[in-house]
Image: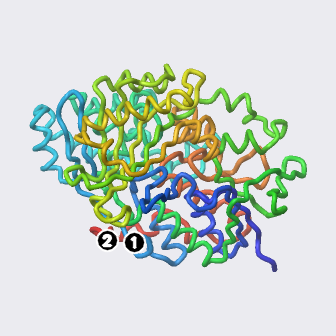
Amino acid sequence: MSKRKVVIVGAGPGGLASAMQLAHAGCDVTILERLDRPGGRTSSIEMDGYRFDCGPTFFLYPRVLREIFNAVGYDLFEECPMVRLDPQYRLTFAQGGKLDCTPDVASMDKQIAKFAPQDVGALKRYLDDNRAKLESFRPILESPFTSAADLIRPSLLPALKHLHPFRSLGAELEKYFEDPRLVIAFAFQSKYLGMSPFNCPSLFSILSFLEYENGVWHPLGGCGQVSQRMAEIAESLGVKIRYQEPVTKVDFNGQEVVGLHTEQGRYDADAFVVNADFANWMTQTVPDHKRRKWKDRNIAKKRFSCSTFMMYLGIEGIYHDLPHHNIHICKDYQQNLQDIETNHQLSDDPSLYVQNASVTDTSLAPDGHSALYVLVPVTHQTDNVDWNTERARYRELTLDKLSQIGLTDIRDRIRCEKIITPDQWQSDYAIYKGATFNLAHNLGQMLHKRPGNRFKELGRVFLVGGGTHPGSGLPVIYESSRISSRMILNDFGIGTSHLEAGSMIDAPEPVSA
């Protein structure tokens, strides 16, 4: 009997994880990737001897990917050596105060006592509550949602007492912390979803908990090296990866997809997995009349995440006093968020994130130099912002802002640089509206209201990545691959017990690599 064929569109983290699982189960797998390298947004940018992560730099909750590696016969930490960071990151507030965030609760309380003594002890209560909350929500994150009926499954009943659908993440954190700076300190992680914590549902309080409970990890060589190793493992399992082969046309038999075309040829398959940006791929590749619920006009009405203004800076010297990860919260954080999500305009006083990874990993830059990564959350593409004119101004504004975290001489140290604006996220990385975190995670766009892992509008089509359930962020993107892979293999009559979540629930985490 011939092997079942699967074609995957996109070698991002979800596509690579899917390829590993499906190939290990005996499928004939081909990946069609539009770029010249694996990883998509989770790839590396290399220039003049410096290496930068393109997108994600925080590697959180390695358990999911570790289970996937284990299921196909590999150990994540052996294949991708990682260092657990402590401090996890430094938070500085323009209003005053800072936190070197560490999983050591006693140390955190000592720091909190310096500017918010009334909140000493609140962190432990937050962590205890969210430990129970995460455990109750695991069935939600690890199972497909196809309709509203899935919300009343018995496995979801323990989550009901933690589910407050009309409470924002910010309001949830206000239950624990009186000082607004601490609310932000444990709610800013909603930016991993591209959303304001004051619009993001309260269930995402588990994001910050995951950092403190399971660690913030740095893969040596950067997160892009994880994607690179996954591609190598996939190929060792028989996966064929076709780089620089974007899909140009889809062949149908009625509503069923039967083949994909690239400039190099036609690929038929028994199942197709789309790891490309959902909204962009559907609107650019699938004819509008083939879609009912997700027509172009309906997609355009959806809420999308913020975008990012990126600077990748090769720096002479090393900022030894600056931790690996740094988040600077601007003075009027609420206004900054409103500018991004509601007004769709550029803030003159933005918050920003800086990765100074060379203090941990000397492989990222020439000796005595640093690879500095700077991210400023901004609105997704909008008529209000012309990046052809704003690009240079925002570069200067961002460099000025870096002085607020001590980088006063940054301009004199720059030896090479690359900038990515929302326009380039769309043009170069095929991201709808340049919304780097995909569809927003509001209540109307979650669970069964998100495009399904089995895309019902097109036969044989399955989705993985941030545009489907469970959502954005590396851990849940990897989980989406596990959900979709189980669906495909079940359709093929192939066993999936080795892909079940929790297969390594008792496996200890290494201290570091």
Where does residue 23 sit, x and y in percent of width and height? 65, 72
Q: Residues within 10 Å of mark 2 (few under 14, many from 20)?
A: some
Q: Amino acid at mark 1?
A: Phe
Residue 404 visible somewhere in the drawing: yes
User: Which residue has dot 1 on it?
Assistant: 77
User: Which residue has dot 2 on it?
Assistant: 513
Query: What residue is rendered at 23% in x and 56% in y?
Result: 86
Question: Mark 2 touching mark 1, by CB under 8 A?
Answer: yes
Q: Amino acid at mark 2?
A: Ala
Where does residue 51 sit, x and y in percent of width and height? 43, 59
Outermost residue on the right side: it is: 253
Query: What residue is rendered at 45% in x and 64% in y?
Result: 502
Using residue 262 as the reference point, say whether residue 204 is left or right of it: left
Q: CA distance from mark 2 to mark 1?
A: 7 Å
Residue 334 placement: quadrant: top left
Camera-side residue: 504 or 399? 399
Using residue 181 as the reference point, say whether residue 14 is left or right of it: right
Q: Earlier in the sequence, mark 2 or mark 1?
A: 1
Query: What residue is rendered at 40% in x and 35% in y?
Result: 202
